[in-house]
Amino acid sequence: METEIKLRVDGQEREVTVDTRTTVLDALRERLGITSPKKGCDHGQCGSCTVLLDGRRATTCLALAVAHDGAEIVTAEGLGTDGELHPVQQAFVDHDALQCGYCTPGQVCSAVGVLREAAQGWPSVVTEVGAEGDIAPARLDHEEIAERMSGNLCRCGAYVNIVPAVAAAAEAEGAGR
Amino acid sequence: MTSTSETSGSGRAVGADLERADARAKVAGQAPYAFEHPVENPCYAHAVLSSVPRGRITSVDTGAACREDGVITVLTYENAERLASTDDAELAILQEPEVAFHGQIVGAVIAETPEAARHAASLVRITYATEPHESELKPDENELYRPDSANGGADTDSMLGDLDAAMEAAAADPEAVALDETYVTAMTHCNPMEPHATIAVWQGDELTLYDSSQSVHGHRDTLAEVFGIDRGRVHMICPYVGGGFGSKGEPHAHAVLAALTARAVPGRPVKLALTRQQMFTLVGYRTPTYQRVRLAAGADGRLTGIGMDAVEQTSRIKEFAEQSANPTRTMYAAEHRRTTHRLAHLDVPVPSWMRAPGECPGMFGPEVAMDELAERLGMDPVELRIRNDAPVAPETGKPFSSRNLVACLNEGARRFGWHGRDPRPGVRRDGRWLVGTGVASSAYPVNRVPGSVAAVQYVGEGRYRVDIGAADLGTGAWTVLAQIAADRLDVPLDAVELRIGDTALPKATVAGGSSGTAMWGSAIVAAARTFRERHGNDPSPGDHAQAETPGNPHAERFAMHAFGAQFVEVRVDADTGEIRVPRLLGVFAAGRIINPRTARSQLVGGMTMGLSMALHEETVTDPRYGLLVNHDLANYHVTANADVRSIEAHWIDEDDPYVNPLGIKGIGEIGITGTAAAVVNAVRHATGVRVREVPVMLDKVLNGMS
Amino acid sequence: MKPFRYERATDAEHAVATVAAHPGAAFLGAGTNLVDHLKLGITAPDLLVDVSRLPLDEVAETADGGLRVGANVRNADLAAHPAVRARYPVLSQALLSGASGQLRNLATTGGNLLQRTRCAYFQDPSTPCNKRDPGTGCAALEGWTRYHAILGASSHCVAVHPSDMAVAMAALDAVVVTLGPDGERRIPVTDFHRLPGDAPHRDTVLRHGELITAVELPGLPWATRSRYRKVRDRASYAFALVSVAVALDLEDDGRTVREARIALGGIAHKPWRAERAEQALRGLPATEENCRTAADAETADAHPLRDNAFKIPLVRNTLAAVVRDLVPETPSGSLEGAR
């Protein structure tokens, strides 16, 4: 059953006809030709399809496109500005935080989401249970970053470079605040 | 970052720490993988897989599928075209009603949308007459046979001296040790993040394929043979590969299926991607192994006998003989030796290449056995390995072109802080954690694969085009081949325009066996030399030259191998048995390193996958159904970010003039060898529990601790 | 995935009426589990009623000092909510133990409760499964059972419930608020999920067309001393082998248990409220030994399968470890030798 939806993708208004069965991921990849979000498992088990959906990192393979009519989506392709890489992307390049590159756009979007979540003071499961209701920005040490980035599998084994890349981006962002 | 100072000069690109050439495109998601190449008006194919492990199709009902909106056609063995060659039974799909394993391709739906294709595939009704099947490797129950050879032409068996006598003598001597244990490695799957996918289009009798491949020329040749057409009529394009690890080293059945389905819609591209679940039965896997390891040693730790008997599985329709006894033939000196490979023919998917085939599983049992031997001798396991270093190749007597295992062990021990280690198992505690350390050796042969050709063309304005149909699976080929070309042409790196991943380019051998950079690089070296000889240093636009990877005059004289040593710290939760690996450190002697940045990533990546093998990876067979039960990434675990802490890869400067003109040994696979043994050895040191199988999961430790 | 119609609900009553009137209809929340099942062919509704935009996304204070959590509150938001972190740390930790950051940003409170088992056989339509296809048998019973039940299972089904959040909610005596064709129902979360018995296709007591609108967390001041521990095969992003949720109310001596709330995950068809263990601990010092005895009381009737007998010692040790974390002054003398 086909239906027309609107999405704002990487800053551009897009109208697209989808099957009610079409996921956001397939709408982007197969119907709009936006292939920066990757399909790795199609079941929320790898994180390769992560984008920023209405400002938050989200997997797109389990989200039905029709349910996200009107959504604002930023993919890895749209993170940068004026031809410059986003600081998280630049940090990935600088730290060689990738090999085959297939999980990378999802890693990058996830990392941008992690920085936003940490800035809002969101805890992770490894965050020390501390001051009740204390909502200071979360400190992103190795353990925190690794836990928060664990929804993005990397089969090439770039984790040891991904964590410092995210840490560097976090530090740069903190310095800029 | 690519800095001008590093690249503007010449003769300095090789060895420079340079940014990955494709990094910017990849972080922005702009590097196109197989399924992402824009094509006009595509349709979609979805595979139908068998639901029984052995039998014969008795009826096919495609009615409901064909009635589905958007369905173009349904293919089964009843209506698919006959292939020109069915010699390779893995690829001979939809030719006959026989089913050889659960999850074999028995049909396909072609439809206008991926949603329609997938749904219609679920509507294809196939009934089977099932036959008794055997799908689980059980060495005591399966009928085992002796293959003619193991992979890569390796001898099936080897025998020197009298191992049985050496074992008996050691058993009879109260000072000596005779160790005889069996070790088990699990069935594992490559699971690259990019699923296997193909876009195929026929124009007349010309076939164009966008495929995820470690060897565009190799895949092309195979598919041309299957379809009985001239190689020149098959064009394969693959500039980027989202990981392969061996699973994309040969074409698998889905590539044939893509081309078959595309025949049904001439002129129209067909897109076919396997689901993650389908990948478990269709693109190969590493066989489980049972390894009987025997070691005989005197009180001084010197080995008098070494034995390795490997039992593995293969598919009834196609043999794949994982060469797991291979590393035992090279690692340590001993007078009496015996290695064997035995296989069971099972009704299972076809096993295939997975990172360091043979060497990776084959370094597990023996390297755990060495740890057990050290413990029984009361000797440090690093020292035991040093004492048994082989001065020449133990089975052939050939000298090594270079062998720096001892240097790796010593340097690793120094960097890791091994010295002064308390050998007692199960006595260190830090809060809730039991702490231990372990070591194992790594090794990987220097493989030669002849037949790569590189072309160099001057395009004007100081720029050179370098063409070779090589593949970059994340290995860094885009980066390091340009570095080699720049130096050998004596031009700045940014003067080189490299093109790879296309059969329109000169033929390249497979990105496999850790041979890519050496083989392709040697072809580029030869082509650059030919170019300069022919056109001098002031060429005209259009001048070109090409050359093939030359033969190696030293190949028969020397044994050629890379070596390494890996050190591990593990922490085991005293309550739950959860295992964490805070530190993993490897030192490798692998010839010349072209780019330390990409090289380090690759070595660390191999070690990470080794860690994953040690702790997580196991494909579970349900022998009742011939089913690989845990066939997705939620149930088949690979390391996640939180499983990894510090992983360091270092190397020893090694100048080996014999391996090839570049002095390259290859680094893609050695990192995964030995890791699992080192982890298991450290678990023993931490907990006192000796586990002889991987993956080592918390219950195996918990049972021993409680 | 069978073609289906899609309707976006604008009010809850209408959504309930629509689904109730239509046997092939289902509610769609974020879809993080439903879309899984649509792709795998486990379920095939012909109408999805999208309730994800209904205004059920508030976390509000209740009169008894508890919280009312709207069914559409995202797992990530609930985990990060200051009141949850401060007053129900066990719930925040349970939520953060589940799935991944990008899934928690989508998944809802109601949807999390309605997650279905991750039993590998359930998810593979080529095998028999009474939960997926009633009457076909249970492939897991004599199959791969590392992730399966040791308590409360039947010969019809040995699957476990996968939620972490629900385990914490079971310990907290949360109440599920639903809206059905006949109006509102309040169902204790411990009664919300079913044991399989001979009808494992029914995960919960919900009726067709009944919609979760909220979960109420009762006021429980001593839940500030609570904790969730998930033991799994990966350090993150994996389902539980065993998980333990504990809230402790201690006497003034700081070590004697006045009251305990204990729930277990990964071991049964539902979040397992461990009342026997609670009973065993009540009035005793929170020592390791007492915890182990309490855990053993809970698992006394366990029926381990081929691959999961280790869950019995794992429950025992994990419960002891969690209590040790909650009562740091526990004399360490009981630590050694008890294993």
Image: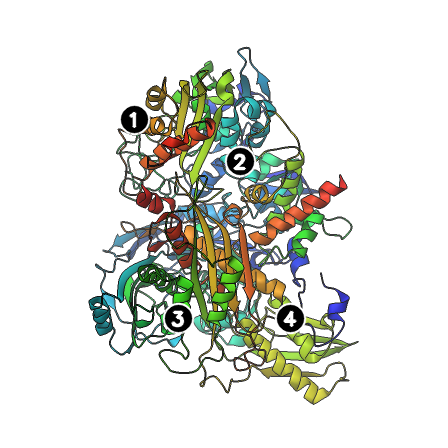
**Residue A96 x, y percent position in the rendering:** 63, 57
Residue type, mark 4 in image: Gly
Please say if A45 is above or below B591. above
Q: Which mark is residue B387?
A: 3
- Disc marking residue C297: 1
Residue located farthest toward the top when viewing the structure as drawn = C63
Image quarter of the C terminus of chain A? top right
Asked if badge 4 and badge 2 are on a common chain, one would say no
- Location of residue B145 in the rendering, given as x and y in whole percent from the top left corner: 25, 69
Type of the residue with mark 3: Arg
Q: Answer above or below: position of C112 versus A158.
A: above
State which mark lies toward you, 1 or 3.
Answer: 3
The residues tagged by marks 3 and 4 sit, at their Cα atoms, a distance apart of 33 Å
Please say if the residues under marks 4 and 2 sit with CB atoms less than 8 Å apart. Answer: no
Q: Numbered disc 2: what chain? A: A
In contact (CB < 8 Å): disc 1 and disc 4: no
- Quickly name the residue at label 2: A125
- Whether residue C192 sits left or right of residue B671 in the image: it is left
**How far across and how far down the image is residue B99, in percent?**
31, 58
Q: Chain of mark 3?
A: B
Is disc 1 in the same subunit as disc 3?
no
Mark pair 2, 3: CA separation = 47 Å
Q: Is residue A10 visible?
A: no
Q: Residues within 10 Å of mark 4 (few under 14, many from 20)?
A: some
> Is there any visible trace of residue B603 in the rendered image?
yes
Number of other residues with Cα within 10 Å of mark 2, as a class: few under 14, some 14 to 19, many 20 or more: many
How many neighbours does mark 1 have within 10 angstroms: few (below 14), some (14-19), or many (20 or more)?
Answer: some
